[in-house]
Amino acid sequence: MFDTTIEIISGENKSKLKSPGFHNLYSQLTQCELLCEKEFESWLDSITENNQVFLFCMFLKGNDNSHELIGTACLYIKHCYYRFMANSATIEDLVIDAKYRNNGLGTKMIEYIINYSQSYNIYKISLHCDNENKNFYLKCGFKQNRLLMEKYFL
């Protein structure tokens, strides 16, 4: 088993993330552009300053106290009018580096996010996934519900 830690990125620890490393991981999930460090820092600031968006990062601990980014996901909290003003949450962009998949790390990340989100009075967590990831999320306790509709502008 790998020695990993999961951290919620904040102003105090965001220096652990650099654009090339984040891009290398994130591009395993979707097509994306490499941001210069200034653009990347601006994006990180927008995440860390928003109290309803949480960026979770999984790091592999090295023998020399180094850390390698091997996983990431975002959690978005939304205040609802219904259900007595409870919150709902959405998990987006969960990715574990291909070199470390099928070792329980995705499950570890999901469980961490679920446990963290329960402090926000949420009544449900939603996510969208590709068909090839459906069984993974079913094993994590998610249920298929409804049909996803999207409209892209770029």
Image (cartoon, helix red, strand yellow):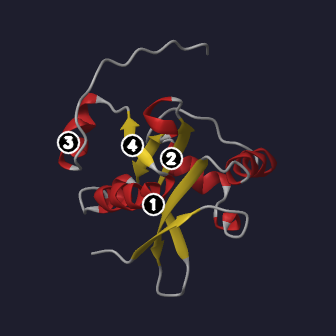
Amino acid type shown at disc 3: Leu
Task: From the top left corner, tell me how far across and down residue 130 is, in percent.
Answer: 31, 30
Pointer 2 or 3: first along the chain = 2
Name the residue: 29% across, 20% down. Answer: 146
Q: Quadrant of the C terminus?
A: top right
Pointer 2 or 1: first along the chain = 2
Task: From the top left corner, tell me how far across and down residue 9 is, in percent.
Answer: 61, 61
Pointer 3 or 1: first along the chain = 1
Check whether the beta carbons of the residues at disc 4 and disc 3 lie within 8 A of each other.
no
**Disc marking residue 75:** 2
Q: Which secondary structure, mark 4?
A: strand
Pointer 4 or 3: first along the chain = 4
Name the residue: 37% across, 19% down. Answer: 148
Check whether the beta carbons of the residues at disc 2 and disc 4 lie within 8 A of each other.
no
- According to the picture, the residue beneath numbered tag 1 turns out to be 116
**Disc marking residue 138:** 3
Q: CA distance from mark 2 to mark 4?
A: 14 Å
Q: CA distance from mark 2 to mark 1?
A: 10 Å
As drawn, which residue projects farthest toward the right? 38
Amino acid type shown at disc 2: Leu
Q: Is residue 68 left or right of residue 115?
A: right
- According to the picture, the residue beneath numbered tag 4 turns out to be 123
